[in-house]
Amino acid sequence: MENEASKKGLQAGSLKKTLRLFKYVKPYWLEFSIGLLFLLISSLAGLAFPKLLGQLVDAGTQGHLTESINRAGLLLVGVLVAQAVFSFFRIMLFVNVTEKTLAALRQHIYNHLIRLPMKFFLQRRVGELSSRISSDISLLQETFTTTIAEFIRQVIIIVGGVILLMSTSFKLTVFMLAVLPVIVIVAIFFGKFIRRFSKEVQEQVAASNTIVEETLQGILNVKAFANEFFEMKRYRQKTDAAARTGMKGGKYRGAFSSFIILGIFGALVAVIWRGAAMGLPTGLLFSFVLYSAFIGASIAGLAEVYSNLQKSIGATEHLLEILDEPAEPIEEQTAIAPAHFLHGQIDFKNVSFHYPSREDIHVLKEISFSVAADQQIALVGPSGAGKSTIVSLLLRLYNPTHGSILFDGKAATSFPLSALRSQMAVVPQDVFLFGGTIRENIAYGKPGATDEEIIHAAKQANAWEFIERIPQGLDTIVGERGIQLSGGQRQRIAIARAVLKNPRILILDEATSALDSESERLVQDALEKLMEGRTSIVIAHRLSTVRQADKIIVLDQGHIVEQGTHHELIRVNGGLYRNLSEMQYTS
C-alpha cells in the first residue's frame, strides 16, 4: 500500500513539474487562448457533422423536396469550410506560441546551464547535456504544437458526442458506453509501461549522443590510436540498446492499439445490431453510428495522446533536473564598484579542500601563504600536489572545505563572483580556442574591443607577427579548438586575450610546458611583458621559467613543504625544490 501511495505521489509530482513549463507560455497567453477558442469552435463544428449527415440521409430516404436536400448539403459544406478555416488559424496560432515558448525555454535552460558551478559539470557529460537541450525540447515541441490540442479536441468530441447520443437514444448510449471502463483501465495500465520505456529510450539516446560528441571532439586521438572500430562498436551497443528498449515498448503499444481496435469496432457492430433491433430510423441510426465512431476514434486517439504526454513528462523531468540545480550568483558586469577593485594582495589561511565527487581524498591540507600586490609567485611540485586546485580556488570555481581565502585583507566571499573573476585572467597549458576567427578569440577577453585594441594586444603577445603573415589576418578561421594554428600560436592568442582583459591578477598554468624552444622564447617574452605591474601566479614544471619569481611555493601531496626564492631554496640540502631542479638539469 505504501509503495502504491508513493507511486501516486510521484505521478502527481511529475504532472505538477510538467505544468511548471506553462509559465513560459504566459507571455503569449492571448494567442494561446484564441487558439484554444478556435480549437473549441472547430471541434464543435466537427460534432455537428454526423447530425447533419443523418439529416441529409433522412431527407433522401424519406422523399423530401430537392430544396431540403440542397439546404442540408449546403449546411454540411458550410460546416466543413468553417471547420477548415478555424483549424488553419488554430494550428498557425499554436505553432507560433510553441516556437516562441520553446525559444524562451531553450534560452532559459542554456542561461541556467552556463551559470551552474563546476561541481555540476564534474558529474555530467557534455553530450548528455547537449541532448537535453536538443532532443528533449523537440519532444516538448510536439506536445505544445499537437498533443495538447489533440487532447482537448478528443475530450470535447467524447463529452459532446456522449451528450448528443444521450439525447438521441439513452438506452443505446448506455449499451455503447459499457465497453468504456475496460478501455480506460487498460489505457492507464499500458501508459505506465509506455512511460517507463520512453524514458529509458531518451536516456540511452542521450548516452549515444555523448559518444558522438566526445569522439568528434577527440577525433585526433581516435585516429591516432586507430580506435575507429572500437568507437563504432561502442556507439552500436548504445544505439542497439535504445532500439531494443524502443521495440519492447512498441510491443506494448501494439498490443494496446490492437485491443482498442477490437474494442471499438466490436462496439460499433454491437451498436448497429442493437439500434436496428430497436427500430431506429435510418438517418438517426446513421448519425448514432458516426458519433459512436467519432467517440471510439477519440478514445483510441486519447491513448496515443496519453503515450505522447508520458514521453513529454519524461523529457520535462530531465530538463527540470537541470533547472533545479542551484546556479552561481553571477551577474553581468558593466562597471566594477570601487569597493570591489582588487589591488592584488592574496592570503590563503589554513585552506583545506577536497572535490565534491571525491570527499575521501584531501587535495589541499592546511595551506597558508601570502602574496603581496604585484608580486610574482611560482607554484611548483610533482603532479597531483595541488597546484591547479589552488588556481580553481582563487577563481572561486570551488570554495575551500576549511579555512579562508582573502583578497586585500577581505574574505573572497565578500566580493561578487563576477567582479572577482572579471579582474583575473588565466593562460592555461591546454589553450581552448573557439572555432571562429582570431579576432573573435582575442576579443573574448574584452567583448566589444576595437580593432586597434585587439591589434595592440596581439603585438604585446608577440602574436601580430604571425597574424600579419596570414592572408585573412584577424579574420582567419582557427577551426575547432584552434586546430588550424600551432601550439605556440594558440598560446600567444591566449596571451593576447589576457592582455586585452588587463587583469589585476594573472594566472599562468604551465603556459610554456608543451612548446618547442623557439615558441617558448616568444611566449615567455610575451608573458614577461604581461606580468609587469600585476600580481602573477605561475604554475610551472620547467623550473628555469620561475627563477626570477619573488617567491616560490613548493607543494607535495597537498602540503606546502618549502617557501622562498630560487637562491634560498636551491641551498636547502635534501629539499624537494633542489631535487627537482637537479633532476631537470641533469636529464
Image (tube, helix red, strand yellow):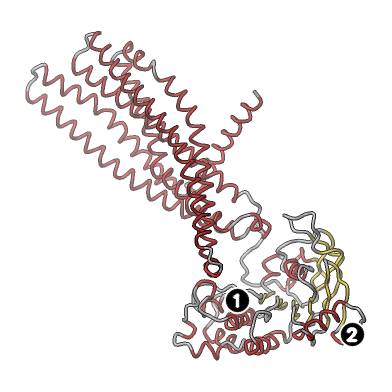
Q: Position of residue 466 (x, y in %)?
A: 53, 89
Q: For the residues labelled 1 and 2, say whether their Cβ atoms are less than 8 Å apart.
A: no
The kind of secondary structure element at disc 1 is loop
Identify the image quadrant of the N terminus: top right
Q: Position of residue 565 (x, y in %)?
A: 86, 84
Residue depicted at x 34% and y 28%: 157
Q: Earlier in the sequence, mark 1 or mark 2?
A: 1
Residue depicted at x 7% and y 25%: 66
Task: Name the amino acid, label 2.
Answer: Glu
Identify the image quadrant of the C terminus: bottom right
Q: What residue would you read off at disc 1?
A: 445
Looking at the image, is 72 positioned above or below residue 441?
above
State which mark lies toward you, 1 or 2. 2
Disc 1 crowd rating (10 Å Cα; few below 14, some 14-19, many 20+) is many
Looking at the image, is 412 positioned above or below residue 55?
below
Disc 2 crowd rating (10 Å Cα; few below 14, some 14-19, many 20+) is few
Label 1 to label 2: alpha-carbon separation? 37 Å
Q: Position of residue 492 (x, y in %)?
A: 60, 83
Q: What residue would you read off at disc 2?
A: 568
324 relative position to 193: left or right: right
Q: Residue furthest right?
A: 573
Q: In the rendered image, which quarter is residue 87 located in?
A: top left
Task: Name the amino acid, label 1.
Answer: Gly
215 relative position to 579: left or right: left
